[in-house]
Image (cartoon, grey):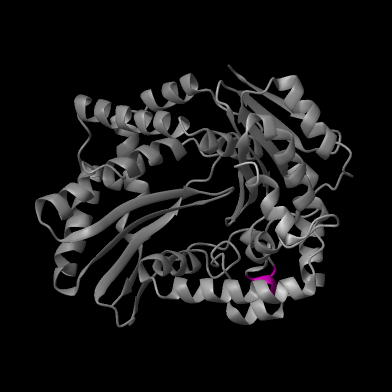
Amino acid sequence: MDFQIFQLPNGIRFIHQYNKSAVAHCGLLINSGTRDEFPHEHGLAHFIEHVLFKGTSKRKTYHINSRLEDVGGEINAYTSKEETAIHATVLKTDFEKAVELIADIAFNSIFPEKELIKEKEVILDEINSYKDSPADLIFDDFEDLLFNETSLGRNILGTKKHLKSFNRDAVLKFIERTYNTDQMVFSSVGKIKPDKALAIVHKYFGSLPANFRSYSRDLLLPYTPFKKQVSKNTYQTHFILGNRGYAFSDDKRIPLLLLTNILGGPAPNSRLNYTLREKYGLTYNVEANYTPYTDTGVFSIYLGTDKSNFERSRELVIGEMKKLQSQRLGIMQLHRAKKQVLGQLAISAESNEQLMLTNAKSLLVYNSVDKMDLITERISSISGDKLMEIANEIFEENALSTLLYT
């Protein structure tokens, strides 16, 4: 069954997709993330995601955690560069409980100072753990350089110094500024009739006061390619190279997604995986990634390998990129690549939780949701010439940046 889209009087949008599962998934997606932080607030969006669960005007932490766990459900949250999500999974009979709890957390949290102090210790430990993982750290360091150390480039966790400075007043100011009702989408998937789902969402979200966004995110600074090497005293060499990519609204976004999948997607037959791992046994982990944002994007290739294998690995990566720049994919190669991406998207949509979050993201960014047949049409129409054009834009040698951990 198709999805239904509604808008509440306060500007919050709601999308519901009916299916026959007895399990319901729902969540609130807020267009507020690391990118909305001022320099002195670095890490505050992620900190708020944690402390939203530390008490509301009518619930203590224990009661928040047990509200859905007692009926076999779960509630969780995440923060990214541009959004914060609070989402839940329950039996369809407990859908209203989940909606009410998410509304309570998002709009009635009280942020007790003693709970903020305790949660800082949890996140400090998270930061320490993160610093022990160079394979993760290199991505954030790369984006920080790629976006000239602006808010879009800064890592989500923040720093110990900034974290220690946060208090209840800082939390409330950030929420008031960025948790805007016209920048929120509530999404749900489950065996619940649309009219009933709307009535429940309206009950808990509809009477909230409107709070429309009054600011614009900072404009990006010009991109200057860089080459940087950092001594990390790690057993492996970690390497990343890439470029700024296309924004959500760019028509070249889907072709770049396809190109990225061909080059270094998750399948064992991606070109980088086949060449570096299967053919030569040089690395366990090599991958290409593309992340679009509101007004830009990031394309990157990462590999981790033994120091003695690094130069050979780097040459092979560059070689595969040059092939895509100079050799048009054959008809059957292009057909297989498209089928692979379409299969990955279809399998991803089988996860109702992922479907719920994808619907929310699409409505938040585009104010619409594309049906699978339209997505299929767009991917099927991509030509070999278009992929070569994009490869020559994104893989242009003089536009590539590199970061090396040795």
Which quadrant of the figure contains the N terminus?
A: top right
Residue 292 against residue 231 in the figure, above or below: above
Q: How many marks?
A: 0
Q: Is 351 in front, or is 364?
A: 351
Q: Main secondary structure of the magenta part?
A: helix
Q: Is 16 in front, or is 156?
A: 16
Horizontal placement of 326 versus 252: left or right? left
Q: Position of residue 381 (x, y in %)?
A: 38, 23
Seen at 55% across and 49% down, the residue is 293
Pick out the residue farthest to the front: 70
Pick out the residue farthest to the top: 1
Q: Is residue 336 visible?
A: yes
Which quadrant of the figure contains the C terminus?
A: bottom left
Seen at 34% across and 61% down, the residue is 241
Q: Position of residue 307 (x, y in %)?
A: 19, 74
Q: Is residue 400 visible?
A: no
Seen at 22% across and 44% down, the residue is 268
Give the residues in magenta: 38-42
Horizontal placement of 134 versus 217: left or right? left
Horizontal placement of 239 versus 89: left or right? left
Residue 349 against residue 51 in the figure, above or below: above
Q: Position of residue 345 (x, y in %)?
A: 41, 32
Q: Is 359 in front, or is 151?
A: 359
Residue 18 against residue 386 in the figure, above or below: above
Horizontal placement of 3 versus 215: left or right? left
Q: Position of residue 348 (x, y in %)?
A: 43, 34
Residue 316 against residue 257 in the figure, above or below: below
Q: Is residue 280 magenta?
A: no
